[in-house]
Amino acid sequence: MGAFIPKHLRHTRPALRSYCRWCARRDARKALFKLVDGPLSYYFCNDEHAIRWCDYRHSCVAVNKLLNTPPSEREATLRGVDVDVWVAGQLNLNEL
Ligand SMILES: [Zn+2]
């Protein structure tokens, strides 16, 4: 029985860019606000977007689903509406 030696070495680059979990704005990770939750790290534009995400991520199923949707697929749900307005609408609030 031979040792397992991969024929091709995979060079994985560390992720240098990410997106805001709240508003989906993309930027370099080092320019974003990092929230560490146990083994997971989440990135945000700033602390305000991090707090909104924490406050509303479990507010209802539709909001939770949107916030877990990658930026490229969000437009199908948001249809041009700002995320703050959309979430407020889902929760029947005037504004966040
Ligand atoms: Zn943001």
Image (cartoon, helix red, strand yellow):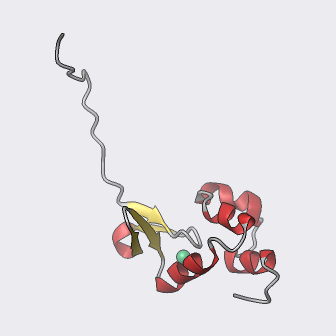
39 or 53: which is nearer to us?
39
Quarter of the picture containing the C terminus is bottom right
Residue sitting at x 75%, y 75%: 86
* 54 with respect to 31 (left or right): right
* 16 with respect to 79 (left or right): left
* 49 with respect to 83 (left or right): left
Residue sitting at x 59%, y 72%: 23
Vertical placement of 33 versus 66: above or below? below
Vertical placement of 13 versus 54: above or below? above
Q: Position of residue 2 (x, y in %)?
A: 17, 13
49 or 30: which is nearer to us?
49
Residue sitting at x 28%, y 34%: 10
Q: Position of residue 32 (x, y in %)?
A: 41, 74
39 or 44: which is nearer to us?
39
Q: Give the total number of marks visible in the rendering.
A: 0
Q: Quadrant of residue 17?
A: bottom left
Vertical placement of 2 versus 52: above or below? above
